[in-house]
Image: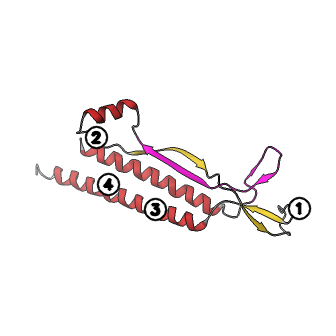
């Protein structure tokens, strides 16, 4: 295991954390968007909340086998495998004057809960900060190692 593996793992965490923050920002920005997409009938549908799916970077069978055989394995980073849509139902709100209201006067609003988004944003921020701290510690160790020969 080299010191560069720790830096690579931290940078992959930074990349995933930045994407999580981007997706949360997009969810918050579209929290009131009633016309995000059109369905097969040509009708508008509200914005659906997006979620980031992450996994260990090297999740192949060979890597698991190698890790099982060697207790001294390298740390792997994280990668974003997919961005999925949250399939929870849309919120209904009575607003008969809205242009997207149905015959009963209800509009469908996105399934975005600002409270959940703020919790996800705080989690992504803390993860980002932890990866920055780890990266700075690795960088500091490398700098100190370079000073040994002086």
Q: Secondary structure at mark 4?
A: helix
Sequence-first disc among 2 and 1:
2
Residue 66's quadrant in the figure? top left
The answer to the question of whether label 4 and label 3 lie on touching residues, with beta carbons closer than 8 A, is: no
Residue 124 location (% of width, % of height): 46, 59
In the current view of this chain or complex, which residue is farthest to the top? Answer: 62
Q: Residues within 10 Å of mark 3 (few under 14, many from 20)?
A: some
> Gap between marks 2 and 1, in whole Å?
60 Å
Nearer to us of marks 4 and 3 is: 3
The answer to the question of whether label 4 and label 2 lie on touching residues, with beta carbons closer than 8 A, is: no
Q: Which residue is mark 2?
A: 74
In magenta, the rendered stretch is: 34-57
> Gap between marks 4 and 1, in whole Å?
56 Å
Q: Secondary structure at mark 3?
A: helix
| Viewport quadrant of the N terminus | top left
Marker disc for residue 103: 1
The answer to the question of whether label 1 and label 3 lie on touching residues, with beta carbons closer than 8 A, is: no
Nearer to us of marks 4 and 1 is: 1
Q: Does 148 appear above or below 114? A: above
Nearer to us of marks 2 and 1 is: 1
Sequence-first disc among 4 and 3:
3
Residue 3 location (% of width, % of height): 25, 46
Marker disc for residue 135: 4
Q: Does 88 appear above or below 8? A: below
> Gap between marks 1 and 3, in whole Å?
41 Å
- On screen, residue 69 versus residue 12, left or right, reads left
Whether the magenta-drawn stretch holds residue 90 is answered as no
Q: Which residue is mark 3?
A: 123
């Amino acid at each position: 295991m080299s010191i560069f593996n720790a830096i690579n793992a931290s940078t992959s965490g930074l990349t995933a954390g930045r994407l999580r923050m981007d997706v949360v920002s997009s969810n918050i920005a579209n929290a009131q968007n009633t016309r995000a997409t059109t369905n097969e009938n040509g009708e508008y549908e509200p914005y659906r909340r997006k979620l980031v799916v992450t996994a260990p970077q090297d999740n192949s069978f060979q890597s698991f086998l190698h890790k099982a055989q060697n207790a001294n394995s390298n740390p792997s980073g994280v990668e974003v495998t997919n961005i999925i849509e949250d399939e929870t139902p849309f919120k209904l709100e009575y607003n008969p004057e809205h242009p997207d209201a149905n015959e009963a006067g209800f509009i469908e609003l996105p399934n975005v809960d600002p409270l959940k988004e703020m919790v996800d944003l705080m989690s992504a921020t803390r993860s980002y900060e932890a990866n920055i701290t780890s990266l700075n510690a690795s960088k500091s160790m490398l700098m100190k190692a370079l000073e040994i020969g002086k």
